[in-house]
Amino acid sequence: MTDMGQTDATNGSGSPTTTRRALLAASAAAATAVPLGAGGAATAAAAAGRPGSAPAGPGRRIRPQQPDPQLRALLSQLDRRRIEAGVRRLAGFGTRHTLSSQDDPVRGIGAARDWIYATMRRYAAASGGRMSVELQTYVQQPAPRIPVATPITNVVATLRGAVSPERIYVVTGHYDSRASDVMDATSDAPGANDDASGVAVVMELARVLATRRLNATVVFAAVAGEEQGLYGSTYLAQQYRAAGADIQGMFSNDIVGSSTADDGTRDPYAVRLFAEGVPTAETAEQARVRQAVGGENDSVSRQLARFVDDVASNEATGMRVRVIYRRDRYLRGSDHIPFLQQGYPAARFTEPNEDFAHQHQDVRVEDGKQYGDLVEFCDFGYITRVARVNLATLYSLAQGPGTPRGATVVTTALTNDTTLRWQRGTEPDLAGYEVVWRETTAPEWTHVIDVGDVTTATIDLSKDNVFFGVRAVDRAGHRSPVAFPQPGS
């Protein structure tokens, strides 16, 4: 075997952390594939796009992150009965249309708002002061689907992190609803699936996590105005951007109430996660760089989606995360889009199939068929499993290290190996870093190389031929989402 030399990655004493020969030997030792857990990339070979084989090279085959005992205990605390009660309570307000009554105590969006706020405040009371709840209100002036000036109110519960509070993860559901006519503010619009299901997930997550000490900050938001044009989430995202908030991940739960399609077929153990490739907020200069080096499949949102698959497709959640390479459903959108517009990593959870007779429909019976977004068409076991996926994701993000910053492929000289640089994180329990790589035709990362607590590593692979990423690891084994490096020095 040709001597490949050493990496220039060193430990704190200045000695090399490993040699390329050692990395290649480790790769050879790992040549017998270990079956991966449910979900994730089914095998490294399949992820590489070549069934029965995996690309040769340094490092070991990547494996999904397994839930730790603390996460497993948290998952067991999610209560299906509470989720069902939440959906039924929200549907019971008759309509939650954005233009419906703001002050009727029993019917309309104002009654729903007040119930969500009061419930979240009860959860916050058990947090030891870590969680705060606010009504975030602004007046939307006349605009598409908003004929008169209308208050839009988000209910925002913030669970402040104990170690890295400036690092933020956001999860939302929208509590407004609609009938067949998007401007009909008076007819019944129970919105059980769209989107009482998502709000019930967010509220149950807030209840379970309120009593936990998380390293990073997690925000649980019930937003309004989605059906009229994403108004509440747009305001929320803009406020975060104006404040310079470091949001490293955002998820919209929108229509997560059933696994049954319009033809009656079911897929009860899968949830779709929509994640864009080319960033919505990409600048002309960023587009120029992407066109030169690739990365159409490596936006921050795609890396976030891969992370979700990595930590939440397993037997502990009982679910498979099906990542969809698209910003949202065809020509449609949800509350993650305003966050994408502000440059934040964001993705949208939704059920595997949709039944359009029970979505955006007047409640009625026509030709013997029941129409309307009614509670009776929700699957509460399914919603609970979606909540598990969310919880596994948020816990793993908040307890793990942040996504590495400043990840760079060094391009100051033409070489057939690849030198990567990044900035060291500030987390007190940071253990080090891993370089991941895959063939350019592979949808998922296939190999990982442990490079230690360093900020530079040289890998014996050409940047022309494969894609690289960098992720952080803490002492408990939690890993961050991958940072996709950009060309630099």
Image: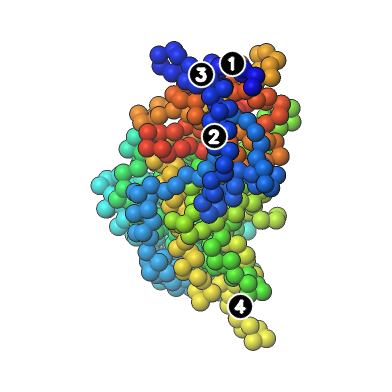
Tell me whether circle 2 and circle 4 mark residues in contact (CB < 8 Å): no
The Cα atoms of the two marked residues, 4 and 3, are separated by 62 Å
Tell me whether circle 1 and circle 2 mark residues in contact (CB < 8 Å): no
Residue corresponding to mark 4 = 371
Q: Secondary structure at mark 1?
A: loop
Residue corresponding to mark 2 = 29
Q: Looking at the figure, which quarter contains the N terminus? A: top right
The Cα atoms of the two marked residues, 4 and 1, are separated by 68 Å
Residue corresponding to mark 1 = 5
Q: How is the image coloured?
A: rainbow
Query: Which is in the foreground here, disc 4 or disc 1?
Result: 1
Q: Earlier in the sequence, mark 3 or mark 2?
A: 3
Tell me whether circle 4 and circle 3 mark residues in contact (CB < 8 Å): no
Q: Amino acid at mark 1?
A: Gly
Label 2 neighbour load within 10 Å: few <14, some 14-19, many 20+: few
Residue corresponding to mark 3 = 9
**Left or right of 264: which side holds 312?**
left
Q: Residue at x 64, y 51 (%)?
A: 324
Give residue 49's position: percent from left, percent from top: 69, 44
Q: Which mark is residue 55?
A: none
Q: Residue at x 56, y 16 (%)?
A: 6
Is 110 situated above or below 187?
above
Q: Secondary structure at mark 2?
A: helix
Is 220 situated above or below 18?
below
Label 3 neighbour load within 10 Å: few <14, some 14-19, many 20+: many
Q: Residue at x 63, y 72 (%)?
A: 265
The Cα atoms of the two marked residues, 2 and 4, are separated by 58 Å
Q: Earlier in the sequence, mark 4 or mark 1?
A: 1
The Cα atoms of the two marked residues, 1 and 2, are separated by 19 Å
